[in-house]
Image (cartoon, rainbow, N blue to C red):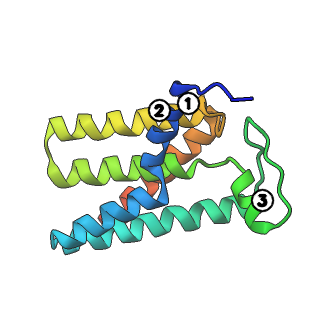
Amino acid sequence: MLKKINIKEYHFRDITSLGSFFITSLILLLVLVLQEYNLFYRLLFGLIFTLVGVVAIRTFYFKNRPKKENYKNYIGKLEASSFPSLHTARMIFLALIFSFHFKQIQMTLFFIFIALITMYSRIHLKKHDWVDLTGGVVLGIITFYLTTIF
């Protein structure tokens, strides 16, 4: 029997991928190709810091996702934990760093919009709740400030 395709779910999966490792790696590569070396190093540091921060928090604090996932090992446990949202941390960091870099209100609004729809997609797909997103926002802001210090 064929399963009915829910087009809305596909759109949200596409939107949520904006905060994925693959897309952020493409952004890093594009910035490097454009020879924006200072921005590249700040992005690289920030993206590594968000990943390490999420892994550290999830190692010591486990919170089930809204749609609970089973796990059998350490890596599975990290993926099954929902706090904080790595997608949200990445997107908030990217929105802040690009807004700071370009210094244009239109670009800032665009980046904030992209971050917000990505965050909503995580809730819609039952990967996170508002507490997880809040943790991701805080981590993204901390990461941005750390990259501006160096």
Q: Are marks 2 and 1 in contact (CB under 8 Å)?
A: yes
* Residue type at numbered disc 1: Glu
- Taking the spot 40% from the left edge, 56% from the top edge, the residue there is 23
Q: Badge 2 is on which residue?
A: 11
Q: Badge 1 is on which residue?
A: 9
Question: Which of the 4 image quarters holds residue 9?
Answer: top right
Mark with earlier residue (1, 3)? 1
Front residue of 150/91: it is: 91
Relative to 43, residue 141 above or below: above
Q: Badge 3 is on which residue?
A: 77
Give the mark toward the camera: 1 or 3. 1
Quadrant for the N terminus, please.
Answer: top right
* Residue type at numbered disc 2: His
State the separation of the CA atoms marked 2 and 1.
5 Å
Q: Secondary structure at mark 1?
A: helix
63 lies left or right of 13: right
Relative to 41, residue 54 above or below: above
- Taking the spot 37% from the left edge, 70% from the top edge, the residue there is 44
| Residue 34 image position (x, y, % from top left) | 15, 68
| Residue 133 image position (x, y, % from top left) | 56, 39
State the separation of the CA atoms marked 1 and 3.
25 Å
Q: Secondary structure at mark 2?
A: helix
147 lies left or right of 129: left
* Residue type at numbered disc 3: Lys
Question: Which of the 4 image quarters holds residue 104?
Answer: top left
Mark with earlier residue (3, 2)? 2
State the separation of the CA atoms marked 3 and 2.
27 Å
Judge whether residue 150 can be spotted in this image.
no
| Residue 123 image position (x, y, % from top left) | 59, 32
Relative to 35, residue 83 above or below: above
- Taking the spot 46% from the left edge, 40% from the top edge, the residue there is 14
